[in-house]
């Protein structure tokens, strides 16, 4: 008998019919003898509605009350899921975050889970109940309701899975897995059967929106095996988890690298648009200049992504280029011009919006030379100009003009042999 956490996102609990369908997935695992914790999101669109209500009530509102308002969506779906399960003859009860309790920091609106006491969940599961836990919420050290940030139910599910030492955490969603790239851009994109935590982390943070980035970080730290799968599958046509945790079902398994036999050199290609770049020329080349540039940007809550600094010819001045979201472009220019009048010396500042960051990701890159070079070659064959380059152990990223983004993604997807074979 295994312990399994099953998370259902907003579209999977969008109405009573969808909840019934999701509940049949739960029943399948219960019938196979497993202990089950279910984690639910709010019904789709609900959280947006609640956020809008809070804003309408007062544009600047008490963050603690905001959390009390928006956390209610998950309570509704947890209650509904429990009722539907009971009606199917599956004993179940719902738990709000504070009842478990899921302890969090007091950063309202973006709280971090600090601890989950599993005793009550174990106790109820051992008594034969399915525990239906609200995603997205917890309780602060002051006993107030907190929320984890948008998309936070994924993180709740992983945290619950770690706390109850689950054999697996299944994320049921409206897509059937993680794809080699965005299928809307490349029709020959294919579902990845297994992907390592590290690769998934890169994919998630680079814009593959299947999983909240924080949930992948947590899964990697706690070694929680995840499966991203479709809740639209017929519950009776897909297998339950095996007794020993073995399974041959659909979806994408996100797991430790050791579980992946054949490591791809490149597993996926991602694309993030609306990237702006800013260049500072003739920055005084002293210790502390990078801090003087990026400190004020951080203070202004501007998230900087790629950074390139040149070595200076004369040892006196250097150039620094970096990227930020388009939406932060004007603000960043203002912040740096202000810094230029006080703490920072440079000759000129320039920049532009409308870039796209294209990345290729794969753990195989660690042991294969030349991936970056081949990527640059593939792009130059299409006449695409590269403006900036950054690399990490398992990723190479370039900044290009936005209008070439799709062309670049398609070219790289084909180049690295990721296109699905014609039937
Ligand atoms: N309901 C919350 C949201 O929409 C949390 C989640 O669904 O993951 O952000
Ligand atoms: Mg989600």
Image (cartoon, rainbow, N blue to C red):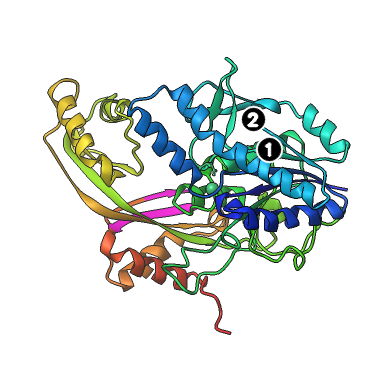
The secondary element bearing badge 2 is classed as helix
Q: Nearer the viewer, residue 59 or 310?
A: 59
Viewer-closest of 298 and 96: 96
Q: Nearer the viewer, residue 79 or 186?
A: 79
The residue under the point 72% across, 53% down is 23
User: Which of marks 2 and 1 precedes in the sequence?
Assistant: 2
Gap between marks 1 and 2, in whole Å? Answer: 7 Å
Q: Which label sits on residue 44?
A: none
Mark 1, secondary structure of its residue: strand
How many neighbours does mark 2 have within 10 angstroms: few (below 14), some (14-19), or many (20 or more)? many
Residue at x 47% of width, y 24% of height: 65
Does the image show residue 223? yes
Q: Quadrant of residue 131?
A: top right
Q: In this orientation, which residue lies closer to the viewer: 12 or 89?
A: 89
Specify the segment rendered in magenta: 390-400
- Structural crowding at the residue carrying mark 1, measured as other residues with C-alpha within 10 Å and reported as few (<14), some (14–19) or many (≥20): many
Q: In the visual, does 16 lie left or right of 318?
A: right
Majority secondary structure of the magenta segment?
strand
Q: Are marks 1 and 2 in contact (CB under 8 Å)?
A: yes
Residue 136 falls left or right of residue 222: left
Tell whether position 164 is magenta: no
Residue 213 pos. (x, y %)? 52, 43
* Residue 97 image label: 2
Q: Residue at x 50, y 34 (%)?
A: 70
Give the residue at the far bottom of this rendering: 423
Q: Is residue 208 above or below residue 262?
A: above
Circle 1 sits on which residue? 133
204 relative position to 377: left or right: right
Query: Do we see residue 316 in this rendering?
Result: no
Q: Is residue 325 above or below residue 411?
A: above
Across and down, in percent, residue 154 comes to 59, 43
């Amino acid at each position: 008998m295994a312990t399994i956490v099953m998370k259902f996102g907003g579209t999977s609990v969008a109405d009573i019919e969808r909840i019934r369908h999701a509940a049949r997935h739960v029943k399948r695992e219960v019938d196979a003898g497993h202990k089950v914790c279910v984690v639910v999101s709010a019904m789709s669109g609900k959280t947006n509605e609640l956020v809008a209500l809070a804003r309408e009530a007062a544009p600047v509102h008490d963050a603690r009350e905001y959390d009390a308002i928006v956390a209610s969506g998950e309570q509704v779906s947890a209650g509904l899921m429990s009722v539907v399960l009971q009606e199917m003859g599956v004993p179940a009860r719902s738990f709000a975050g504070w009842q478990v309790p899921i302890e969090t920091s007091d950063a309202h609106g973006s709280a971090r889970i600090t601890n989950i006491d599993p005793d009550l969940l174990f106790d109820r599961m051992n008594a034969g109940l399915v525990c239906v836990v609200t995603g997205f919420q917890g309780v602060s050290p002051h006993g107030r309701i907190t929320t984890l940030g948008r998309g936070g139910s994924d993180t709740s599910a992983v945290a619950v899975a770690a706390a109850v030492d689950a054999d697996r955490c299944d994320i049921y969603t409206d897509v059937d897995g993680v794809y080699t790239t965005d299928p809307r851009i490349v029709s020959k994109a294919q579902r990845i059967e297994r992907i390592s935590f590290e690769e998934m982390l890169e994919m998630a943070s680079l814009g593959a929106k299947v999983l909240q980035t924080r949930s992948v970080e947590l899964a990697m730290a706690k070694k929680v095996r995840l499966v991203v799968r479709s809740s639209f599958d017929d519950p009776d046509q897909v297998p339950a988890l095996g007794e020993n945790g073995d399974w041959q079902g659909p979806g994408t398994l996100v797991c430790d690298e050791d579980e992946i036999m054949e490591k791809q050199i490149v597993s996926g290609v991602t694309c993030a648009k609306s990237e702006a770049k800013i260049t500072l020329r003739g920055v005084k080349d002293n210790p502390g200049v990078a801090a003087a540039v990026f400190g004020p940007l951080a203070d202004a809550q501007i998230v900087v992504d790629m950074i390139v600094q040149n070595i200076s010819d004369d040892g006196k001045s250097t150039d620094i280029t970096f990227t930020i979201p388009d939406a932060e472009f004007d603000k960043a220019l203002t912040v740096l011009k202000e810094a230029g009048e006080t703490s920072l010396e440079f000759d000129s500042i320039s920049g532009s919006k409308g870039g796209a960051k294209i990345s290729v990701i794969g753990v195989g890159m660690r042991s294969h030379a030349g991936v970056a070079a081949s990527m640059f070659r593939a792009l130059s064959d299409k006449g695409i100009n590269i403006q900036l380059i950054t690399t990490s152990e398992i990723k190479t990223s370039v900044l290009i003009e936005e209008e070439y983004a799709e062309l670049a993604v398609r070219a790289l997807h084909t180049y690295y042999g990721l296109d699905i074979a014609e039937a």
